[in-house]
């Protein structure tokens, strides 16, 4: 299974980025292989629609799960349409979030916000 996580830095001990659509990177972690690669978020500099573009990039990566602290409704529609499950991340490193997910400690993200348009 592949897991996508928005990341502030390209290192496993870095923190989860608080922004899904404007994060600089995504970690795509393969739980079966135990390996991860970082993907630059090309949508981060978009004038608008960053969440939708970022969601499509996550879908295209083959991720089946997204761990994030929050997600806008337009991005969630793209992710839900592709059957990508969205789980609420915890404060901590990417590694800590992967371990928490594997242990079944991250609930589904229920609160989808209307987005941060115009920033």
Image (cartoon, rainbow, N blue to C red):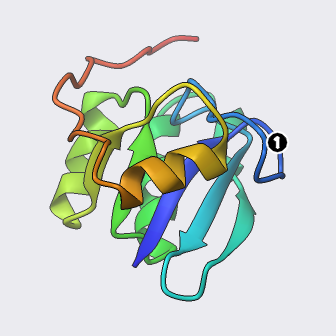
Q: Where is residue 20 in the image (x, y as percent from the top left)?
A: 51, 35
Q: Check the picture and name the quadrant holding the N terminus.
A: bottom left
- Assess disc 1: are there few (<14), some (14-19) or many (≥20) residues with their C-alpha within 10 Å of its C-alpha: some
Residue 107 x/y as whole percent: 23, 39
User: Is 32 situated above or below 46?
Assistant: below
Quadrant hosting residue 68: top left
The one of 119 and 58 positioned closer to us in this rendering: 58
Name the residue at the bottom extreme: 33
Q: In the current view of this chain or complex, which residue is farthest to the right?
A: 10
Element under label 1? loop
Residue located 39% across and 53% down the image:
101
In-front residue for pair 24/100: 100
**Is residue 64 shown above or below 69?**
below
Counting from the top left corner in percent of width and height, residue 56 is at 43, 59
Counting from the top left corner in percent of width and height, residue 23 is at 65, 36
Residue picked out by circle 1: 9
Q: In this view, does 92 lie to the left or right of 103?
A: right
Q: In the figure, is residue 31 to the left or right of 38?
A: left
Residue toward you, 72 or 92: 92
Residue depicted at x 57% and y 24%:
18
For the point 26% across and 42% down, the residue is 76
Residue that extends furthest to the front in the rendered view of this protein: 103
Quadrant of the image for the C terminus?
top right
* Point 43% across, 48% down: residue: 100
Q: In this view, does 68 lie above or below 118?
A: below
Number of marks: 1
Please say if 15 is above or below 30. above
């Amino acid at each position: 299974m592949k897991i996508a996580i928005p990341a502030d830095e390209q290192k496993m001990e870095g923190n989860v980025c608080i922004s899904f659509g404007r994060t600089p990177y995504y970690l795509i972690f393969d739980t079966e292989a135990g390996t991860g690669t970082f993907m630059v978020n090309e949508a981060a500099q978009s004038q608008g629609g960053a969440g939708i573009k970022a969601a499509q990039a996550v879908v295209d990566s083959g991720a089946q799960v997204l761990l994030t602290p929050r997600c806008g409704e337009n991005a969630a529609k793209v992710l839900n349409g592709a059957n990508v499950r969205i789980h609420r991340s915890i404060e901590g490193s990417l590694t800590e979030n992967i371990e928490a997910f594997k242990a079944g400690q991250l609930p589904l993200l229920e609160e989808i916000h209307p987005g941060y348009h115009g920033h």
